[in-house]
Amino acid sequence: MRGRALKLSAPRRLVNDLMRFSIGIPRVTVQRRMNLGSLVRARMSLHAKPSWTVLFLKGYALLAQEMPELRRAYVKFPWPQLYEYPLSVASIAHEREYDGERVVLLSLIKDPEHRPIAELETLIQVARSRPVLEVKEFRRALGIARIPTPIRRLLMWLGLNIGRQRANRFGTFQLSVYSGLGAESLNPLTPLTTLLNYGLIGQDGSVNVRIHYDHRVMDGANVARALERFEKILNGAVADEVKLLGQSASVAAGREDFNR
């Protein structure tokens, strides 16, 4: 059958390269069925609700702050070793349109554990809405995609295997979610130590949450305990911060009414 050949776009070359470096990682998945009722109720009380992406991002960053294993990476230069970072750098996957094509691009958020939910929401909305070439990480990635393949892949290998550079270029963990489209990703690939995703969230707060992890860095029991603690953080510290957002909004509304 006669078809037509399509040239790989810059974003598709980036995905191909990331898959090339991801395919050899011994990745395992651990899933926990969570009940996030406390967080659901706190979120529903707000008029301007923060996205679930932001809430999971903040909770996972707080979890990684407690568990250094989630801030470690397996690197190969100058020899195989684990490298531990003092803080997290989140890599967030976004679907954007570029040159008439729907593509996936990654933005980075440094130190999300110490950023308020409102600030994280703003950073993610900027990455989702600002013109692609105005987002620093998108612009840099698309520029790298135009470098000849052998040089591009060498640069990516160095970025992934030099400990001090890896987090700055790729992050310490990735968050990639399709639940907003009514679907779940069961076997995503990433070159990072962990990838977090979750399924559809029920009205009662029930949801499947998964951590896909590099078995060279940690073991399944660590991840199972991490998911148990993650559920408590989401229903505790994150839900408490969401409640404070509601209180702050009520105070601001009261001041506005008083000044009219």
Image (cartoon, rainbow, N blue to C red):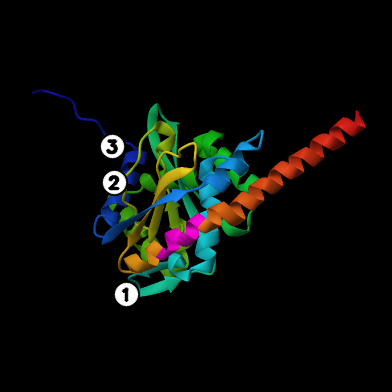
- Which labelled disc corresponds to residue 8? 3
Residue visible at 49% across and 40% down in the picture: 204
- In front here: 11 or 251? 251
Residue 116 in the image, given as x and y percentages of width and height = 65, 51
Residue 111 visible in this rendered orientation of the protein: no
- In front here: 4 or 95? 95
- In front here: 250 or 18? 250
- In front here: 92 or 32? 32
Cα distance between the residues tagged 1 and 2: 24 Å
Residue visible at 10% across and 23% down in the picture: 2
The crowd level at tag 1 (other Cα within 10 Å; few <14, some 14-19, many 20+) is few
Q: Which residue is mark 1?
A: 80
Q: Quadrant of the N terminus?
A: top left
Counting residues from the start of the chain, the first of labels 1 and 2 encountered is: 2
- Is disc 2 placed on a helix, strand or loop? helix
Q: Which residues are magenta?
A: 225-231
Q: Amino acid at mark 2?
A: Asn
Q: Amino acid at mark 1?
A: Pro
